[in-house]
């Protein structure tokens, strides 16, 4: 995609793949600690035609996604000055994150510290320590005599002094969302989530400084004997430009009980 506004120009054709190793451990009924280590790869990708066809099938216009196709280029200029220019695929370890949670009555506090283990020049990390804190709450009702879990969350991400577009970086980013998960069968659950967050950068272009709104839908399938859960979800940017226009999430989780 390419865009320009008031002295700003963006050219972008990238596909990002992230593979994460995530560990979580509960301590009693109230506490949880976790660690996540991602590996990030940015390339021209191979899903462009699949994404265009998917949008055609569900009736979403591809007019906001015109531009280069099947290449790799990320260029951002402001007032004629090149702020970011990547022309070759890059990959590497991303920013690791230590997480924690504490249950307080009907709500759960969740926080995290993101460490600068990635490389800001490759856009696999921000080059700063970021801290997040959010409040999560929810409950369970029924739909067609099956459990329907609902939840909501709101929080803020405090950003350290990063190395990616540092002149335009904001100091704090609010976020929030709502989700539903319906237990269709003893093994299969279907879910959807609406997620929104503030912008990371003080830039006029929506693709860089806009407010992302993403709608995700998918399902979980349990393998009780193996104590495994397979989760597949698709995320779509419902405010085209502010977030990746298509996301595919696949995870395999093993639980202790």
Image (cartoon, helix red, strand yellow):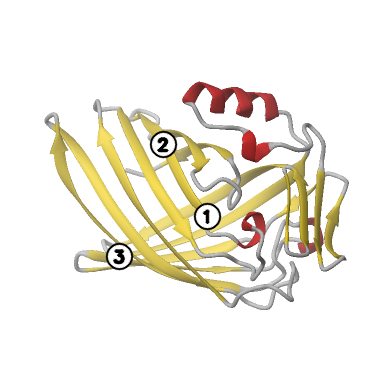
Within 10 Å of the Cα at label 2, are there few (<14), some (14-19), or many (20+) other Cα atoms? some
Q: Report the residue at 38% width, 33% height from top.
A: 220
* Above/below status of 54 relative to 210: above
- The one of 88 and 66 positioned closer to us in this rendering: 66
Q: Are marks 3 and 2 in contact (CB under 8 Å)?
A: no
- The one of 122 and 251 positioned closer to us in this rendering: 122
Can you tell which of label 3 and label 1 is closer to the viewer?
Answer: 1
Task: Give the residue at the far front of this rendering.
Answer: 6
Residue at mark 3 to residue at mark 2: CA–CA distance: 23 Å
Q: Report the residue at 37% width, 65% height from top.
A: 154
Q: Pointer 2: what residue? A: 217
* Above/below status of 49 relative to 15: above
Q: Report the residue at 68% width, 49% height from top.
A: 39
Question: x, y percentage for residue 70?
Answer: 78, 32
- Give the SS element for disc 2: strand
- The image's mark for residue 212 is 1
Question: x, y percentage for residue 64?
Answer: 63, 40
- The image's mark for residue 108 is 3
Q: Upstream in the sequence, badge 3 or badge 2? A: 3
Q: Report the residue at 26% width, 61% height from top.
A: 29
């Amino acid at each position: 995609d390419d865009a320009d506004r008031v002295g700003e120009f963006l050219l972008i054709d990238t596909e990002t793949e992230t593979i994460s190793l995530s560990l979580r451990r509960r301590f009693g009924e109230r506490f949880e600690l976790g660690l996540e280590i991602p590996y990030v790869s940015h390339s021209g990708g191979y899903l462009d035609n699949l994404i265009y066809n998917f949008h055609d099938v569900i009736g979403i216009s591809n007019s906001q996604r015109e531009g280069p196709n099947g290449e790799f280029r990320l260029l951002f200029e402001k007032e004629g000055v090149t702020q970011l220019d990547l022309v070759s695929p890059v990959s590497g370890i991303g920013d690791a994150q230590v997480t924690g949670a504490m249950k307080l009555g009907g709500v759960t506090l969740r926080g995290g510290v993101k460490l600068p283990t990635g490389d800001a020049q490759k856009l696999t990390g921000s080059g700063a320590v970021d801290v997040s804190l959010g409040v999560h709450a929810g409950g369970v009702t029924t739909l067609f005599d099956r459990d329907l879990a609902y939840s909501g969350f709101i929080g803020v991400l405090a950003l350290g002094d990063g190395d990616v577009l540092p002149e335009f970086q904001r100091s704090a980013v609010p976020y929030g969302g709502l989700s539903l998960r319906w237990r269709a069968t003893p093994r299969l659950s279907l879910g959807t989530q609406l997620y929104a967050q503030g912008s990371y950068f003080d830039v006029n272009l929506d693709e860089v400084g806009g407010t992302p709104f993403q709608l995700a839908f998918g399902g979980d399938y349990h393998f009780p004997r193996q104590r495994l859960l397979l989760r597949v979800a698709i995320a779509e940017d419902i405010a085209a430009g502010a977030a990746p226009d298509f996301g595919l999430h696949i995870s395999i989780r093993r639980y202790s009980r």
